[in-house]
Image: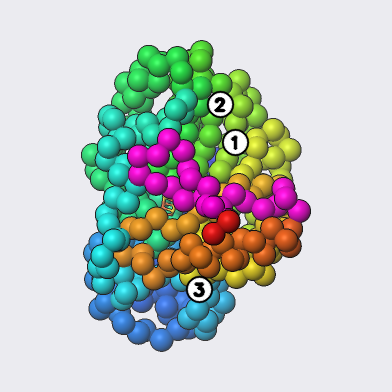
Amino acid sequence: MPIITRSAAAVEAEDWQQILAQSFRRPQALLEYLNLPLSELPQRLQACDEFSMLVPRPYAAQMLPGDADDPLLLQVLPQATENEHRPGYITDPLAEKDTNIQPGIIHKYRGRILLLATAGCAVNCRYCFRRHFAYADNRIGRKQWAEALAYVAADAGISEVILSGGDPLLLQDEALQELIHLIEDIPHVRRLRIHTRLPVVIPQRLTTALQEMLHNSRLQTSIVVHINHPNELSEAHRQPLQALRQSGTTLLNQAVLLRKVNNNLGILSDLSERLFEFGVLPYYLHLLDSVRGAHHFDVSEQEAVFLYRQLLAELPGYLVPRLVREEAGKANKSPINLDR
Ligand code: SF4
């Protein structure tokens, strides 16, 4: 009888999708898993009505059971305070509606466009500036990619395509390869950037096929991961991230400064050092975007500058991310003035 084997790529692909399917989607289940009291459940469920909960199990496994203030838990567990709508915290703080020039495309900055390759994420971060984004109006499938990329082909000034989302690595490798080929067919596009949090919350997503796909592309490739706390990096991330970097993809990190999560010199310093150890360069440290439901994460600019000055004194320059704020209508991210 012939032995039927599956390729390593098929096994890997199945694994990350199966893991994603088993994610926590209800606050009660996550609290029980972490041996935490089932407090404020109605309010947490109310917060889920506005922005659903999604927490993959590998990410939850890195939280400390019994610790209600675990910095990873605080990023993903719906809180009662999200239901208080504070003045100044709005649904579209970056006015992306104005730059969402056609379904699936945001053209904010000169020379590069954002292609919203998927309409979902692998984790729902409670502070996300897109927590109210009209994904339903921007859902473009494989059939519409060519149409969206016609916009890029028509503008010779665009040299970089940024795959964002939702999380573009939710695409299966075969679909992602098809999309990359379509982008490669546009002669003036030289760079491909992928913004993703998926490899952080499910490191199994860093498949060999993904690594080879990026290595074989004619485009200069970079991946911008999103890690806010050193506890988010485990031994499971080390080998795939290092392999990806060694195969020629530039790895950068963007973090958000978040109250009770990482507004601390030791944590920010450890984060930079750990990122570098895993082959990732600290790139941006963002101030929070004023999105409705996330006010409790906000760190004042004054405190951010105070922390940042200490970070500059603590680390070599290449380990210090740029402290920035994104502002609606600006042609670039705004560096924070340290001389205040
Ligand atoms: S992964 Fe990124 S886009 Fe998705 S919820 Fe988190 S911060 Fe927002």
Q: Nearer the viewer, residue 74 or 265?
A: 265
Q: What element does badge 2 sit on?
A: strand
Which quadrant is home to the C terminus? Answer: bottom right
Q: Is residue 163 above or below residue 229?
A: above
Distance from disc 1 to disc 3, alpha carbons, whole Å, reads 30 Å
Mark 3 and mark 2 lie on one chain; the one further toward the N terminus is 2
Q: What element does badge 1 sit on?
A: strand
Q: Are marks 3 and 2 in contact (CB under 8 Å)?
A: no
* Region of the chain picked out in magenta, as a range: 316-338
Write down the quadrant of residue 131 in the picture.
bottom left
Q: How is this picture coloured? A: rainbow
The image position of residue 222, as x and y in percent, is: 59, 36
Residue located at (40% from left, 50% from top) = 121
Q: Is residue 189 above or below residue 88?
A: above
Distance from disc 3 to disc 2, alpha carbons, whole Å, reads 36 Å
Write down the quadrant of residue 307 in the picture.
bottom right
Pointer 3 residue:
260
Q: Is residue 223 above or below residue 180?
A: below
Pointer 2 residue:
191
> Type of residue at label 2?
Arg
Q: Nearer the viewer, mark 1 or mark 3?
A: 3
